[in-house]
Structure formats: structure tokens, C-alpha cells
Image (cartoon, coloured by chain):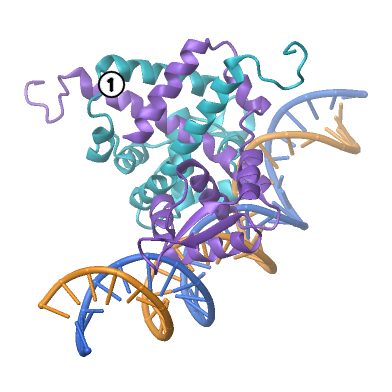
Chain colours: A cyan, B purple, C blue, D orange
Amino acid sequence: MSTKLPDPDPSPRSALELELGVELNALLSASRALTERSAAAFHPELQPAAFHIARWLYAYGPAKPSAVAEAVGMDRSSTSHLIGWMKRLGLVESRPDPSDRRAVLLSLSPTGEAQVLAALDLRGAAFSARLRGWSEEDLQTFTALLHRFNAG
Amino acid sequence: MSTKLPDPDPSPRSALELELGVELNALLSASRALTERSAAAFHPELQPAAFHIARWLYAYGPAKPSAVAEAVGMDRSSTSHLIGWMKRLGLVESRPDPSDRRAVLLSLSPTGEAQVLAALDLRGAAFSARLRGWSEEDLQTFTALLHRFNAG
DNA sequence: CGATATAGTGGGGATAAATCAACCATCCTC
DNA sequence: GAGGATGGTTGATTTATCCCCACTATATCG
């Protein structure tokens, strides 16, 4: 009787993926508050949304404005406006794309990178406290799996 | 010259935590776009930020409005307004807190839960595609570590 | 019982952000 | 090289969000 069900989920595969999705959702839900607070700490006189761009640039390196807009879910107009702001503050640098003269490549300036790191507070107490009790092996495993998921 | 660095980081522990932080940051950066799109799909005539509340309620269950506001990084005023909106749409229900008669306990209605699931699209193609090639063991390990991190 | 603190709700004004549209420079195709 | 498409910037308009304040009801403390 269990031979031809349309959606019986006989494989535990779907259940595993669903469970992972639930955990990811929990992480993303909870991290919103932290993200907003980090954005406030990023630069006093800067729009909160700019931090999303800076953080993405920190994570994924130089890219064209259109790629940034697509990646962080903003339209090009907003992205361009925020980028201009950060360039004026010396947090972001742009150089012409050697392969396409109408495009530019954006990257964080050393100052910008330092600001992102400070805002993220990756060595901060709140972050480390979560990892108390973790073995170094678990840390490595978690990081590796996360990296693989991000690359996916 | 390298004898007295202020941040020599001799233990690999800090390096491991830092690396994990980088990966987490990459995940959060990239997920913003998906979140914004999900928010748009959540309910046509609802403010985007309402989805953050609904998603948090889905992940962490019934809670008081103040706890929700704290958790998602909004002030109580915005939270109350958005909650009221969702209650009017039948997505969120509230019942009096038995232990404190001035407080209320918020929870997603069945409709609301279904909407969150649909918006998250946890079984969606984009999500499953990322997990292609993962063994079931890796899925389990990743989920377990994520759960542990979230609980931390 | 009185005074103060806390949970929740709501209004009004300031600000940030998304949207829409126009615009220029460069690329690509025919 | 002409025409259309693409990358990027900018300005105007609309919308959403934040922040401060007031108000009610309940709880807690003295």
C-alpha cells in the first residue's frame, strides 16, 4: 500500500531538508535584531541599509554595483545612492572594470573593512559566549558545513 | 619586532571563532535578498517588516509583544502596529497571559503559519538545489550544529 | 492602601528607504 | 556605424519605519 503515494515522503531526505530549513529560519529570525544594532554601530551618520552593502562587500569581495544590488535585494537606484554615500565617507572605493568600461568594481577601503569588523564584533563577548562549550572540532565542522552551504 | 603584538592570537580557538563568524556573516549577507522577497510573498497588502515578526513567531512560538519587539529589533510601537495589522488579517492570534493580566500571548494562526511556510518555501527548488550532493549524514550534522548554535 | 513601575496601545512628526523615471556612456549585434 | 541593450548615476515622489510622547490597565513595592 505504500508503493505509489504521490507525496508520502518515504525518504527521510525531505524531512531532513525541512528540519534544516526550520533551523536556518530560526537563525535568520534571531539575527535581525543583531544586524540592525550592528548597522547602527557601523557608522554614526550613515543609513542603516548601507551596512548591508558593506557587510556583503566584506563577505564576497569586489563586485559591480548591479551584482551587489541583486545580492542584497535592493534595486540599483538605492544601491547606487548608498554606495555614493559610503564613497564620500571613504568607506568604499571604486575602480573601473578593466573588462567593461561602463562598469566599476566596488570594494571596501581599509577603513571600511575595519568598520565592518568593528560593527560585526566577531570577537565580541556575545558571539563567543554562544560558542562556549564547543569543541574545536565542532567549530571546524560547523564552519566547513556553513561554507559549503554558502558556496552552494 | 613581532614580540609584543597586542593581538597575537596564539590560540587557534580565536581563529576558529573568527572564521565561523566570517561564514555566518556571509550567510546573513546573502540571505537578506531572499528574506525581502519572501516578505513580499508573505502577504500582498502587508508591510515588509510584518514578515519578520511572523517568521520569528513561527520559529520561536508564542510570546509577548515586548519579547517579540526585543527579539526582532523593533520598538514596541512598530511591533504593536504590525501585530494589530496581522490580527486584523487573521494571521496572528492573541490570548491573555494567564500569569499576567496586562500581558498577552501572541501566536500564529493556522492561516498565518501556512502563509509563513509558503513564503519561506522551505521545500522550494532554490533551497533544495543548495543541498544537492549533501549526504544525509551531513544534513543531520549541519542541522544539529545549527540547532545548538541557535539555542546558545 | 497609595505610589511607582511595567505591559500594551495608539498618535504625530521626522527620517530613511523603495519606487519610478529620465539620463549618459559603453557595449554588442547586424 | 546605427540601433538597441546594458551598467550606472541621479532626482522626485511615495511609502514605510523609527522615535518620542501620552494614555489605560495591571502589577509590585512600601
Question: How far across and down, in percent of the image, does residue A75 sit?
Answer: 63, 46
Return the residue nearer the eye: C16 or B21: B21
At 63% across and 64% down in the image, what residue appears? B88
Q: Is residue A87 visible?
A: no
Question: How far across and down, in percent of the image, does residue A67 sit?
Answer: 60, 34
The local crowd at label 1, few if under 14, some if 14 to 19, many if 20 or more residues have their Cα within 10 Å, is some
Residue A5 lies left or right of residue A51; in this view the side is right
- In this rendering, is residue A103 above or below A88? above
Q: How many marks?
A: 1
At 47% across and 11% down in the image, what residue appears? B137
Question: How far across and down, in percent of the image, does residue C9 sit?
Answer: 50, 72
Return the residue nearer the eye: A84 or B23: B23
The quadrant of the image that shows the N terminus of chain B is: top left
At 30% across and 35% down in the image, what residue appears? A122
Residue C29 lies left or right of residue D26; in this view the side is right
At 7% across and 21% down in the image, what residue appears? B3
Q: Quadrant of residue B86?
A: bottom right
Residue B133 lies left or right of residue B69; in this view the side is right
- In this rendering, is residue B30 above or below D22? above
The quadrant of the image that shows the C terminus of chain B is: top left
Kind of residue at disc 1: Leu
- In this rendering, is residue A2 above or below B118? above
Chain letter for the residue marked with disc 1 in the picture: B
Q: Quadrant of residue C30?
A: top right
Return the residue nearer the eye: A25 or B61: B61
**Residue underneath mark 1:** B16
Q: Is residue A71 visible?
A: yes
Question: How far across and down, in percent of the image, does residue A124 sit?
Answer: 24, 38
